[in-house]
Image (cartoon, rainbow, N blue to C red):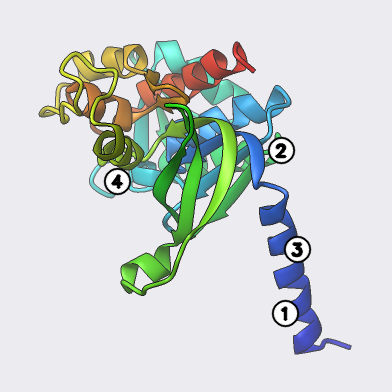
Amino acid sequence: MIDEIEITRLIVKNAVDDFLDSLEIDVAIAGGGPSGLVAARYLAENKARVALFERRLSVGGGMWGGGMLFPRIVVQEEAREILDEFGIKYKKEGDKFVANSIESVAKLASKAIDSGARIFNGISVEDVIIRDKRVSGFVLNWSSVMAAKLHVDPLAIRSEFCIDATGHPAEVCNIVQRKVGRLNTPSGEIEGEKSMWAEKSETLVIENTREIYPGLYVAGMAANAVFGAPRMGPIFGGMLLSGRKAAEVILDQL
């Protein structure tokens, strides 16, 4: 017998159980783009308790659309091993590698989940928890609540470390800057991303993946936005390597 009430009970119970089990974790990640998914996978496979919060219904960030809706992405040699580790197929073209953007997102998400990371979609990071001058968790609300501008109070999760992988807006870093006034950048402020220059950006996104305030790391395009580096367009090697670097640096401290 298929009963609608039983279906409802199973969905709510299992979803709430997962959320309750993610209230106190090792690493909380804001943003389910490529850098966030890669970070989640490497952290989780090394036994860190990880939850990723994506404000949209779908993860993948800008990778889904490839370049201008041509569903392909480019990766340079330095990041090819990450494609291999995630089982993403590619075609070699000169010294670059071309992959299907849809397959890439699907396999990044699948590997992250298989490694033990929990992914929550439709949830936005509204604020952060700061204790003893350290970011110690996220304040969360349903994205639909925020879009509708409803007066609904949020809930919170606690974590040892947080990662801002929200892409171009660098949403968490902006929140923290408003709260504390100064970040770990040369000016103490978010510099803002510069116009496209892929060659520079692909190197700088890895260099800029670092702790931006105690307990808060920045990865992916958010890192370049915070440190005033250029955007890179649909070449994603730096994004993948940035996610791995964020995971490695945090794992050294767990």
Q: CA distance from mark 3 to mark 4?
A: 37 Å
Q: Earlier in the sequence, mark 1 or mark 3?
A: 1
First of labels 4, 2 by sequence position:
4
Q: Are marks 2 and 1 in contact (CB under 8 Å)?
A: no
N-term mark: 2 or 3: 3
Query: Amino acid type of disc 1?
Result: Thr
| Foreground: disc 4 or disc 2 | 2
Q: Residues within 10 Å of mark 4 (few under 14, many from 20)?
A: few
Disc 2 to disc 3: CB gap under 8 Å: no
In the picture of the structure, the residue carrying the numbered disc 1 is 8
| Left or right: where 26 falls relative to 193 | right
Q: 105 or 167, which is in the foreground?
A: 167
Task: State the separation of the CA atoms marked 1 and 3.
Answer: 10 Å
Amino acid type at circle 4 is Phe
Which quadrant of the rendered structure holds the C terminus?
top right
Query: What number is the disc on residue 116?
Result: 2
Q: Which callout, 4 or 1, points to the residue nearer the camera? A: 1
Q: Position of residue 83 (x, y in %)?
A: 52, 25
From mark 2 to mark 1, how far is it between C-alphas?
25 Å
The mark nearer the N terminus, 4 or 1, is 1
Q: Secondary structure at mark 1?
A: helix
Let me know if residue 57 appears in the view.
no
